[in-house]
Image (cartoon, rainbow, N blue to C red):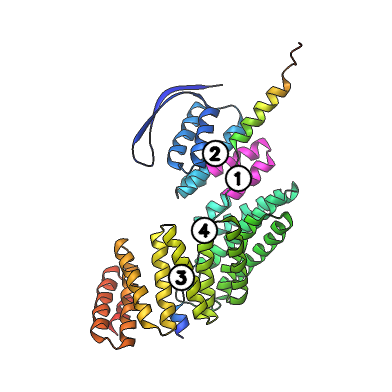
């Protein structure tokens, strides 16, 4: 087995350099890379995988795993072209060696990456291959995962052509068709993961199915799906999933005109976002709460939440968010008859709209 | 309507599920196979 003998310098997440004395085989380096990636240290993990590749191996299963994990690491690092490159290498390799399970997995990963890149037709081909091989091998887990990925591709395809500003349920036929397909794939996936008793997979599928029903304008079904998602998130103590479910439940309640219930869900989402220290999500929850209290005609509370949103948007240097907060604050102050305050925020909104090139915002502000 | 104006366009998707090819599992299996193939030591 080839052995590397060198000193590798790598920058870890604290931006300090770590020096590794290398006298290791390809597999040793790759195992260390796997350990680092499992711990979330993808940057250093990638360096180790690359060092492993430099050493080289004649074991094609090890090489396939390195390609696959490198692809996944780049996916987590949001370097999708690199991710695509390695998942493609893995697909070619597994096809050459006749490793059907490996080919199914490579296809699934390639499909996910192509979806993120907006290459939906190619992603569909990959998902179909993943599903076909999983069926051929009688691999129920693989079938469920392929159906989930398929649902995600159609959901993203539908959303990519959604017209901004169009309300859910009012999209063009092309969008509705894609979303209906997404719902069918998620429902088929749900049958399999229920049969397998895989609660974690059920949770993910319920979440995305709920969002698909929401876009299709089926708000009651969306609510039921997100309630299931919430239940499973609580079973696992998964607070991020819980927060997502509360946010999505709030959205569905708005369309059902159950504003008090929506506010309750958004408040829980806000509380969890604060616990998880997710500032951008906290800002979004404040914005949603501000809008919900506006619908409840409780303008004092609406102002309170829109101000909280404004402060976070300023902290994050999010000019678009800041503009939205100013617009909302202007409206709430107008409703309360605070004309000076309303004018102040309207002027601020106009200034930000000009700066960000938001023409519709600029026109609204001038009104 | 007011709902159409004040609804949220922001909804939260679940994460993608990436397939994994575990090297640790492969290494453990390789190690086990080697151990099982070793001749028994006569006492």
- Identify the image quadrant of residue A351: bottom left
Q: Are marks 1 and 4 in contact (CB under 8 Å)?
A: no
Q: Are marks 3 and 4 on the same chain?
A: yes
Chain letter of the residue beneath label 1 in the structure image: A
Residue corresponding to mark 2: A67
Query: How far is disc 4 from disc 2 in space, using C-alphas?
Result: 32 Å
The residue sitting at the bottom extreme is A337
N-terminal of the two: label 1 or label 3? 1
N-terminal of the two: label 1 or label 2? 2
Q: Does dot 2 land on a helix, a strand or a loop?
A: helix
N-terminal of the two: label 1 or label 4? 1
Q: Are marks 4 and 2 on the same chain?
A: yes
Residue range in magenta is A85-109
Q: Are marks 1 and 2 in contact (CB under 8 Å)?
A: yes
Chain letter of the residue beneath label 3 in the structure image: A
Q: Position of residue A327 (x, y in %)?
A: 32, 77
Residue corresponding to mark 4: A239
| Label 1 packing within 10 angstroms: few (<14), some (14-19), many (20+) | many
Residue corresponding to mark 3: A267
């Amino acid at each position: 087995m080839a052995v590397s003998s060198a000193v590798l310098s790598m920058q870890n997440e604290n931006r300090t350099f770590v020096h590794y004395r290398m006298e290791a085989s390809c597999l040793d380096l790759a195992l260390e890379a796997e350990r680092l990636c499992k711990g979330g240290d993808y940057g250093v993990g990638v360096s180790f995988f690359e060092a492993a590749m430099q050493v080289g191996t004649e074991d094609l299963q090890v090489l396939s795993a390195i390609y696959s994990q490198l692809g996944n690491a780049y996916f987590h690092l949001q370097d999708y072209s690199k991710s695509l490159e390695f998942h493609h290498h893995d697909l070619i390799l597994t096809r050459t060696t006749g490793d059907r399970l490996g080919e199914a997995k490579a296809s699934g990963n390639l499909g996910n990456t192509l979806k993120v890149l907006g290459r939906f037709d190619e992603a569909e081909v990959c998902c179909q291959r993943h599903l076909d091989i999983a069926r051929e091998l009688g691999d129920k887990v693989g079938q469920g995962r392929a159906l989930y990925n398929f649902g995600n591709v159609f959901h993203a395809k539908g959303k990519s052509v959604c017209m901004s500003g169009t309300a859910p349920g009012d999209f063009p036929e092309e969008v509705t068709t894609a979303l209906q397909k997404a719902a069918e794939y998620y429902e088929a996936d749900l049958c399999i993961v229920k049969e397998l008793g895989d609660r974690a997979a059920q949770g993910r599928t319920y979440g995305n199915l709920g969002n698909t029903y929401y876009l299709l304008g089926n708000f009651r079904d969306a609510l039921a799906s997100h309630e299931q998602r919430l239940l499973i998130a609580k079973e696992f103590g998964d607070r991020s999933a819980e927060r997502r479910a509360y946010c999505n439940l709030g959205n569905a309640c708005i369309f059902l005109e159950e504003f008090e219930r929506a506010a309750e869900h958004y408040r829980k989402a806000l509380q969890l976002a604060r616990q998880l220290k997710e500032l951008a999500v906290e800002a979004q929850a404040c914005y949603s709460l501000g809008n919900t209290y506006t619908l409840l005609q409780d303008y004092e509370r609406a102002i309170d939440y829109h101000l909280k949103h404004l402060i976070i948007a300023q902290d994050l240097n999010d000019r678009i968010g800041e503009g939205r907060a100013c617009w909302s604050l202007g409206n709430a102050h107008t409703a309360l008859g605070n004309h000076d305050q309303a004018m102040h925020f309207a002027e601020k909104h106009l200034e930000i709209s000009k700066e960000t090139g938001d023409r519709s915002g600029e026109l609204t502000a001038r009104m | 309507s007011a709902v159409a104006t004040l609804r949220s366009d922001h909804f939260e998707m679940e994460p993608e599920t990436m397939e994994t090819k575990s090297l640790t599992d492969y290494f453990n299996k390789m190690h086990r196979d080697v151990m099982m193939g070793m001749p028994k030591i006569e006492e």
